[in-house]
Amino acid sequence: MVSAPRRRYELTQSQKLMVFILAMSLYGISNMFSELIPEIKLGPIEIKVEYFAFIPLTLCILFNPLYAALGASFGEVIFGELLLGQFGGLGELEKFIEFTLAMYIAGLLVSDPRNRKQLALASFVAVGIDQMLSAIVDISKVWFGIEELEAVPGIPESIVLIEGLSFLNAMVITGILFSLLPTLFLVPRLYGKIEPLLGMKPRDSRVQVSFGKLMTPRLLITSILFVFIGVTGEFLSEADINIAVWEPEFLEQYGSGFMWVSVAAAALVLIVTLYAALRAKSKNSQSPEGTQI
């Protein structure tokens, strides 16, 4: 007897929106708390936490990678920059595109959320792509004369060496402590448990494909195009050709305390989203024809 082909894992539009808002609010909250962690200086080396990568990565693995990655990036922009009056206009495009691309590709790499090797690979790929692209852009700005080299005391005046050390620091601190370890702990424990609470099925039907099949010409061309757009925006911003900057002076009177307003806004969005998801699931289960999608 021939078994039926496995259906492709898909979410409805409302579920995709739910994943988007969930990622936006969760990462928006976490991003502001990561800013509170102080930097540690060991001679010329600065040790700092870039971001809590495991939060968007976990959502990309368990749900839809694209909508979770976009939601996380918008969460940083809305709750971490716009509401705090720290939006840099065109210059923010680079970070937005690089982070979204990194999380999206990392989420695609995991076909089985219980596979620890895939989770480990995705954890390093997520942080690695983001930090590598950022380092390449910073090096290019110095080489093209758009930005002057900011020498670090105790380190030779080489932009490649400085960015290399920064990349290594990000991979060790953020890549291991705030990506690999939490992802390995959370994903297997949440898998199959959190999805039914939101009215969704786990990713059992995700078809396993090789890395070569994932890196399609369409994905590569799209990625290169968006990275080029982000780099162009950053170069224009550094050349004082900038638009859509949002840095109102009236927020300065509140100081760092205004951050809690942004945290409260993100928390409210999260609570409303979870309430709506649970209510929709309850209605669906009570309906005689209701089935879980």
Image: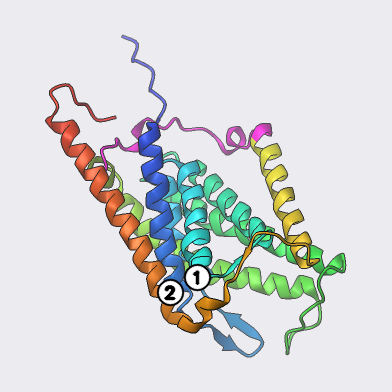
What are the residue bounds of the magenta stretch?
A: 198-218
Question: Which quarter shows the N terminus?
Answer: top left
Relative to 190, residue 211 above or below: above
Mark sitting earlier along the chain (2/1): 1
Answer yes or no: is residue 193 visible.
no
For disc 2, the marked residue is 259
Q: What residue type is labelled 2?
A: Met
- Tell me, yes or no, whether the highlighted magenta stretch contains residue 284: no
What secondary structure is found at the residue carrying circle 2?
helix
Give above or below for 255 relative to 213.
below
Q: In which quarter of the image is residue 248?
A: bottom right
Q: Nearer the viewer, residue 62 or 280?
A: 280
Q: In which quarter of the image is residue 3?
A: top left
Please report the residue visible at 47 percent of the width from the left and 54 percent of the height from the top: 72
> Residue 86's x, y, as percent?
57, 70
Query: CB atoms at circles 2 and 1 under 8 Å apart?
Result: yes
Label 1 CA crowd tier, 10 Å (few <14, some 14–19, many 20+) = many
Residue 200 magenta-highlighted: yes
Say if 122 sits above or below 134 in the image: above
In the image, farthest residue toward the top: 1
Q: Which residue is denoted by mark 1 in the rendering?
A: 84
Snapshot colouring:
rainbow
